[in-house]
Amino acid sequence: MNNDADIVFQSYGRSCNNIIFFEDFYDIFMSKSQNVRDMFVNTNMEAQRALLRSGILWLVMRARGMPDTKIRALGESHSRSKMNINPSFYGLWLDALIETLYRHDPEFSPEMEKIWRRTLSPSIDLIKSMY
């Protein structure tokens, strides 16, 4: 049986081939909170979707053993002194990612949701700790 990080990697691969995945993610994420919507008011969303594609891949690759350099860079860029992304938003972000995966990965299931959450949580916790 594949380990959790491999399952997540394969699930992401099935999901992210369609550019609509990233559009759906932001539609879902922004529907979670006016504060989230406000963060993206003056954002080039095409560029933001490209950043999201990379960011999720970094989270997945970190779980597969890649050094945490990219995750620490995300933590630094999202910290209070830079973009000031409140740690409370990461739960909404992860929920939006899970909802998007349910839409785009035909093999997604409640068990896979648990695997995704378990796999990304250490890196998300690291980012939050750098606030």
Image (cartoon, rainbow, N blue to C red):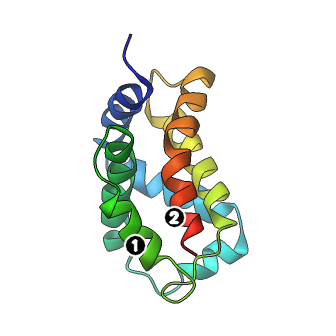
> Image quarter for residue 13?
top left
Front: mark 1 or 2: 2
10 Å crowding of disc 1: few (<14), some (14-19), many (20+)? some
Give the residue type that dot 2 points to. Ile
**Left or right of residue 78, residue 71 in this image:** left
Query: Front-most of 15 and 61?
Result: 61
Circle number at residue 45: 1
Residues at badges 1 and 2 in contact (C-beta under 8 Å)? Answer: no
| Placement of the C terminus among the 4 image quadrants | bottom right
Q: Residue at the location (35% across, 56% down)? A: 68
The percent coordinates of residue 66 (x first, y second) are: 28, 47
The secondary element bearing badge 1 is classed as helix
Residue position for label 2: 127
Going by the numbered disc 1, the residue's amino acid type is: Met
Above or below, comparing residue 55 to residue 106 in the picture: below
Image quadrant in which you'd find residue 90: bottom right
